[in-house]
């Protein structure tokens, strides 16, 4: 498969063409809405950090990249889809660790390395794919296994905030629930195709937009930059 070959991975797409996945394409507005709401929340906050702005911009990029993939549907736009997603994951995890350890570089590096190794092992165990190769046909999980490391990391983060009674716990757990349900919708997209005609992949976008918003608001409201609040030191 070359980068310009037409890719058909989802129920809604039945042929080449820019507007052959209308629901899958339009539902990416959820990420843009999430970015806009988070931006408004950040402007209302007195505790702003550069990483908050970067992550909000990445949230918008996820929506744009996924829109391009579900309209142009080729190898190049698939990269535009997955690169912002995994960049967001890496930067969010790294920033969360840094802030929750109150800016302790050694702790941040140690925890981040442990998390990275665990994610790497998970990716290796699940085939190491961050894109989905349609040449081999869909597997029984429709390529969703590639997101297992992100799911495990998010739930681990949820458990930590819950155990420590961190004020961000409700938003983080909400994000984890949204991601779990959205992953289910992504997985059953092709299974439900004959019944729905359009599949369920669009709900992956809608719920992931909600997940991203919850994660961004958790930062903005409860995990501010180091030195701007006592939350990090109190709960690290």
Image (tube, rainbow, N blue to C red):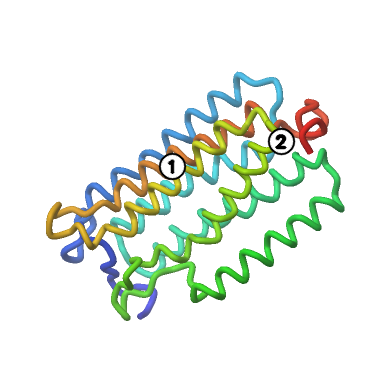
Q: Residues within 10 Å of mark 1 (few under 14, many from 20)?
A: many
Res 36 label: none
Quadrant for residue 160, please give it. top right
Q: Is residue 36 above or below residue 149?
A: above
The quarter of the picture where the C terminus appears is top right
The quarter of the picture where the N terminus appears is bottom left
Quadrant for residue 133, please give it. bottom left
Q: Going by the image, does 120 lie left or right of 36? A: right
- Which one is nearer the viewer's eye here, 67 or 41? 41
Circle 2 or circle 1, nearest the eye? 2
Q: Is residue 201 above or below residue 119?
A: above
Would you name the residue on which mark 2 appears? 164
Quadrant for residue 218, please give it. top right
Q: Going by the image, does 14 lie left or right of 56? A: left
Report x, y in % for residue 44.
60, 19
Report x, y in % for residue 2.
37, 79
Query: Residue at point 56% right, 48% down?
Result: 155
Q: For numbered disc 1, what is the local secondary structure?
A: helix
Would you name the residue on which mark 1 appears? 178
| Total marks in image | 2
Q: Are marks 2 and 1 in contact (CB under 8 Å)?
A: no
Marks 2/1: CA distance? 22 Å
- Which one is nearer the viewer's eye here, 17 or 196? 196
Q: Is residue 177 above or below residue 84?
A: above
Query: Residue at point 33% right, 66% down?
Result: 142
- Which one is nearer the viewer's eye here, 213 or 84? 213
């Amino acid at each position: 498969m070359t980068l310009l070959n037409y890719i058909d991975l989802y129920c809604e797409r039945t042929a080449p063409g820019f507007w052959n996945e209308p629901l899958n394409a339009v539902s990416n507005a959820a990420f843009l809405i999430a970015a806009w709401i988070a931006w408004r929340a950040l402007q209302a906050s007195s505790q702003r950090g550069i990483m908050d702005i970067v992550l909000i911009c990445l949230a918008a990029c996820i929506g744009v990249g996924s829109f391009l993939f579900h309209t142009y549907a080729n190898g190049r736009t698939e990269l535009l889809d997955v690169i912002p997603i995994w960049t967001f994951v890496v930067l969010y995890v790294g920033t969360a660790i840094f802030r929750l350890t109150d800016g302790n570089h050694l702790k941040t590096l140690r925890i981040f390395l442990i998390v990275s190794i665990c994610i790497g092992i998970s990716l290796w165990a699940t085939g190491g794919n961050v894109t989905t190769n349609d040449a081999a046909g869909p597997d029984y999980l429709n390529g969703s296994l590639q997101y297992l490391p992100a799911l495990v990391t998010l739930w681990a983060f949820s458990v930590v905030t819950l155990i420590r009674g961190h004020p961000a716990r409700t938003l983080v757990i909400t994000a984890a629930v949204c991601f779990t349900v959205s992953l289910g919708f992504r997985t059953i997209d092709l299974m439900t195709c004959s019944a729905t005609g359009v599949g369920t992949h669009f709900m992956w976008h809608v719920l992931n937009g909600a997940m991203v918003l919850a994660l961004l608001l958790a930062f903005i409201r409860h995990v501010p930059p180091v030195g701007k609040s006592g939350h990090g030191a109190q709960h690290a």
